Image: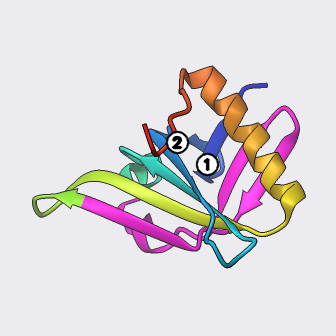
Amino acid sequence: MSTSIQFITGLNEDISGVSLRKPRNSEKKIVVLTFERLQAVEQLRAYRKQISNLWLRDEEGEIKVTPTGVKFFYVGDDELSKVECTFEVEAEDIFERVMRFLNRYAEENGFEYQSSSD
């Protein structure tokens, strides 16, 4: 089974970047997924204000996350340039599961790890 990322069941999205963060005074891990375009928005223009779930699917099954933030970036008045979807993970086992998913997604889509200090 291949990996998929969906805001709407059956409508696959393509990640253009991933950022992982960890606040100094917290056990939370923050995952930021960047998309250059979203099928969900292109298919349903009104969907911009209703993103409440994100599904990450792979051979292990499904991870349902609730975004803590979704930012839309525009060029000009109406041209979407990118979307950032942020979600937090507190439990270590869930974070490890998300990382396994992201590693599979990276392998399938030719992503490479880059440290922020590079």
Q: Tell me if residue 3 can be seen.
A: no
The residue that appears at 62% across and 44% down in the rendered structure is 5
**Dot placed on the residue nearer the N-terminal end, 2 or 1:** 1
Left or right: 14, with 101 as reference point: left
Query: Would you say residue 102 sits in the magenta stretch?
Result: no
Specify start and end residues of the magenta stretch as a single range.
44-73
Q: Which quarter of the rendering shows the N terminus?
A: top right
| Quadrant placement of the C terminus | top left
Quadrant of res 31: bottom right
- Identify the residue under disc 1: 6
Query: Which disc number belongs to residue 56?
Result: none
- Read off the residue under disc 2: 13
How crowded pointer 2 is (Cα within 10 Å; few <14, some 14-19, many 20+) is rated as some
Task: Assess whether mark 1 and mark 2 are in contact (beta carbons under 8 angstroms).
Answer: yes
Q: Give whichever of 87, 75 is nearer the camera.
A: 87
Q: Position of residue 52 (x, y in %)?
A: 60, 71
Q: Is residue 64 magenta?
A: yes
Task: Give the crowd class for mark 1: few <14, some 14-19, many >=20 residues within 10 Å.
Answer: some
Q: Secondary structure at mark 2?
A: loop
Q: Amino acid at mark 1?
A: Gln
Between the residue at mark 2 and the residue at mark 1, the CA separation in whole angstroms equals: 6 Å
Looking at the picture, does residue 38 appear above or below residue 58?
Answer: below
Residue 26 horizontal side relative to residue 12, left or right: right
- Frontmost residue, 76 versus 10: 76
Residue, far left: 76
With 14 as the anchor, is 5 left or right in this view? right
Q: Residue at 72%, 26% (x, y): give it.
A: 2
Q: Does the image show residue 50?
A: yes
Q: Which quadrant of the structure image shows residue 87?
A: bottom right
At x 46% / y 67%, what residue is drawn? 70
Query: Judging from the image, what secondary structure is the residue with disc 1 in?
Result: strand
